[in-house]
Amino acid sequence: MNLHLTLKKNWFDLILSGEKKEEYREIKPYWEKRLMGKTYDKVIFRNGYAANAPQFTIKLKSITQGTGKSEWGAEEGKRYFVLSLGEIINTKNIDKSDANYK
């Protein structure tokens, strides 16, 4: 099953480049309902809501709970759902000459 998430450009670019290997979501009822008790194997990340927004699909290794890295957007000492990311499967609407694309 695919998990669909929208990201701000800086986080989108860091994951696309392979530098950022985790994504975080707050432990709140909304995310508990979406993430717990479900089996996701891929994440589709989008940068924006337009029909032609850049997007890519990436393997999802696991979803755990823990603290995140501040350089990747997590608050110090705060607990999150931690999405551990694997390799990129495909891209759509991404300029291959973009410096962030590998």
Image (spheres, rainbow, N blue to C red):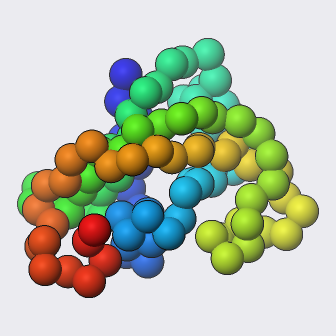
Residue at the image point whose x is 46% and y is 45% from the top: 86
| Relative to 59, 19 lies left or right | right
Splitting the image into 4 quarters, where does residue 69 fall?
bottom right
Q: Of residues 75 and 95, which is closer to you in this image?
A: 95
Q: Where in the figure is residue 21, as x and y percent of width and height?
A: 55, 57
Question: Residue at coordinates 48% horizontally, 37% vertically from top-left?
Answer: 60
Q: Position of residue 45 (x, y in %)?
A: 35, 52
Residue 23's x, y, as percent? 57, 54
Percent coordinates x, y for residue 68 in the rendering: 74, 59
Q: Is residue 10 visible?
A: yes
Instruction: Write the residue at 51% across / 19% down.
Output: 39
- The quarter of the displayed image where residue 74 is located: bottom right
Quadrant occupied by the C terminus: bottom left
- Nearest the camera: 56 or 36? 56
Left or right: 24, with 76 as reference point: left
Q: Eyeballing the image, is 89 above or below 45?
A: above
Q: How many marks?
A: 0
- Judging depth in this view, the residue of 56 and 31 nearest the camera is 56
Which residue corresponds to the image point at 63% horizontal and 34% vertical from the top-left?
A: 63
State whether residue 80 is above or below residue 42: below
Residue 88, placed above or below residue 31:
below
Position of the N terminus, as image quadrant, is: top left
